[in-house]
Image (cartoon, rainbow, N blue to C red):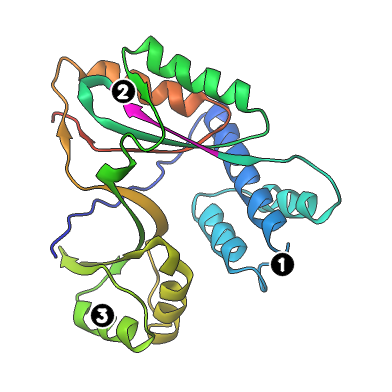
Amino acid sequence: MGRSFENRKVSILKTAGQKSKLYSKYGKQLYVVAKKGVPDPELNPALRSMIEKAKRDQVPAHVIEKAIEKASGAGGEDYVAARYEGFGPGGCSIIVDCLTDNNNRTITDVRNCFTKTGAKLGPSGSVAHLFDHLAVLSFKGDNAEQVLEAMLEAEVDVDDVECKDGQVTLFAPAAEFYKAKTAFSEAFPETELEVEEITFLPQATKDISAEDAPMFEKFINLLNDCEDVQDIYHNAVLPN
């Protein structure tokens, strides 16, 4: 118990280039989720959750609608998930999740990010075991015990519930995400979730020296600029 968790929200994106990257990211994710299930958020909880997340990140309705409409048609792109692992500047552990329709392009782009910053791309599984793959739900409150009771009553497999600085955070296995979210919504219909995601949380952190910090930031920026990169997880702690 007592797992620490820092709420990580997408910062407000100001430039057209950054917005374009964000819209493209959600466009791909919405397309894939809709294509795998049904293009109706009422019948597809994964799609419904993705739409809610996109709206919170200020993705325009027309971007969301276009992705779903595209998934409703025949044919279209064939995106597949690709995950890369390795060690970033300062020896931190890195997981990079991508959606791609061209594996050769994606691995080349990701490898270049590692090479240009002295980082090391590792084989599959090289660092994933150092992270916990969890569903995370977080909101303002202090009723951790009530949340735990509601989850147990709904037979949700809970990993941890913590209350810190007026914020309650629930951790559950990734596979329990939709079940936990549904149970939460039914038990606390008036409470708005500030965080609802499936993520990789490091089991231990790695302090990055002031000397390595600029290269680490360059590394993350290069990855964020890659067309196919969707999410980046790491255990780095930068100096204040």
Coordinates of residue 75 in the picture (x, y in percent): 84, 45
Distance (Cα) linking label 2 and label 1: 39 Å
What numbered label is drawn on residue 148?
A: 3
Q: Are marks 2 and 3 in contact (CB under 8 Å)?
A: no
Q: Secondary structure at mark 1?
A: loop
Residue 40's label in the rendered image is 1
Question: Which circle marks residue 217 in the picture?
Answer: 2
Q: Is residue 56 above or below residue 209?
A: below
Residue stretch rendered in magenta on the structure: 82-88
Crowd class of label 3 (few under 14; some 14 to 19; many from 20; radius 10 Å): some
Q: CA distance from mark 1 to mark 3?
A: 31 Å
Dot 3 amino acid type: Leu
| Residue shown at 64% from the left, 68% from the top | 44
x, y (%) of residue 78?
72, 41
Q: In the displayed structure, does residue 146 sit left or right of residue 53?
A: left
Query: Does 153 sit left or right of 70 as displayed?
Result: left
Of circles 2 and 3, which is in front? 3
Q: What element does badge 2 sit on? A: helix
Which comes sooner in the sequence, label 1 or label 3? 1
Instruction: Provide the major secondary structure of the magenta segment.
Output: strand
For image coordinates 54% across by 63% down, the residue present is: 49
Disc 2 crowd rating (10 Å Cα; few below 14, some 14-19, many 20+) is some
- Compute the Cα span from label 2 to label 3: 38 Å
Quadrant of image for the C terminus: top left
